[in-house]
Amino acid sequence: MNQKLINIVLAAAIAIILFLQLKSGSASADSTKTADTTTAHKIAYVDLDSIQEKYAFYKEKMLEFEKKKENADRDLNSAFQKIEGERIAFAKRGESITQAEYENFQRTYQSKMQNLEQQKMVLENNIAGEGVKTMDDLKTRINEFLKEYNKKKGYSYIFSYSSSLNVLFYKDSAYNITDEVVAGLNEAYKKSGAGK
């Protein structure tokens, strides 16, 4: 998998999750009270690209994710090379191979290759599942932090921005609270004892 593609998918997942969270939060708020439409709303945004670059939890999880992917790729390549080595060694026997030996080897070879493909699919699914779990954890951490953060700041809306998603078509950097959010997230992560 391409690193840029992974980052785009993860950024998209974060943006969608945050959007849905804000949408569900505003829907419940609308049902409990009538909004005064004449009052100005305080708005801010968080740059998801900066969270990916600066948030220690995210960076650690991405390093773990990449290591697992590299290990899986290395294991699969090693297994493939072993099977290919067996095929080459068998082919070197040349004309001394009987029809029965050839058919037996062919069945064994195909079975090993199918098993390897299945193993590859399982590993890819496991890694993708871990990625989704990490993104859910990231969303939860951001949402929990923003709830506490917003008690002091009083924003009506906090949007997410990512250069790859274009959720916001225009942004005024005066409303960018990303540095405060990242600093708070990193502080909370260190306090949790998980940050090294």
Image (cartoon, rainbow, N blue to C red):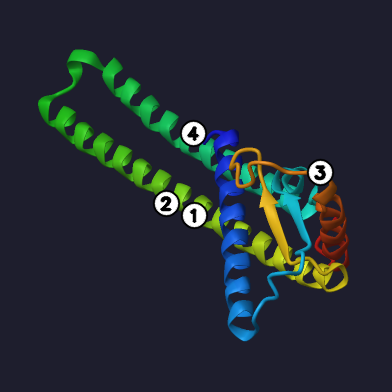
On residue 126, which mark appears?
A: 1
Q: Which three-letter amino acid code belongs to the residue tagged 1?
A: Asn
In the image, what residue occupies the spot 74% across and 70% down?
Answer: 144
Q: Which image quadrant is residue 92 in?
A: top left
What residue do we see at 80% from left, 51% from top?
56
What amino acid does circle 2 point to? Answer: Val
Instruction: Name the residue carrying label 4.
Output: 78
Q: Residue 171: image x %, image y %? A: 73, 43
- Which mark lies nearer to you, 4 or 2? 2
Query: Marks 3 and 1, how far apart in space?
Result: 39 Å
Q: Which residue is mark 3?
A: 173
Q: Of residues 54 and 49, which is closer to you in this image?
A: 49
On the image, the x and y values in percent for residue 186 come to: 84, 57
Nearer-N-terminus badge (3/1): 1
Mark 3 or 4: in front is 3
The residue that disc 2 covers is 122
Please state which of residues 154 and 162 is positioned toward the viewer in this rendering: 154
Q: Residue at x 22, y 32 (%)?
A: 105
Amino acid type at circle 3 is Ser
Q: CA distance from mark 1 to mark 4?
A: 19 Å
Q: Are marks 3 and 1 in contact (CB under 8 Å)?
A: no
Identify the element where label 2 is drawn. Answer: helix
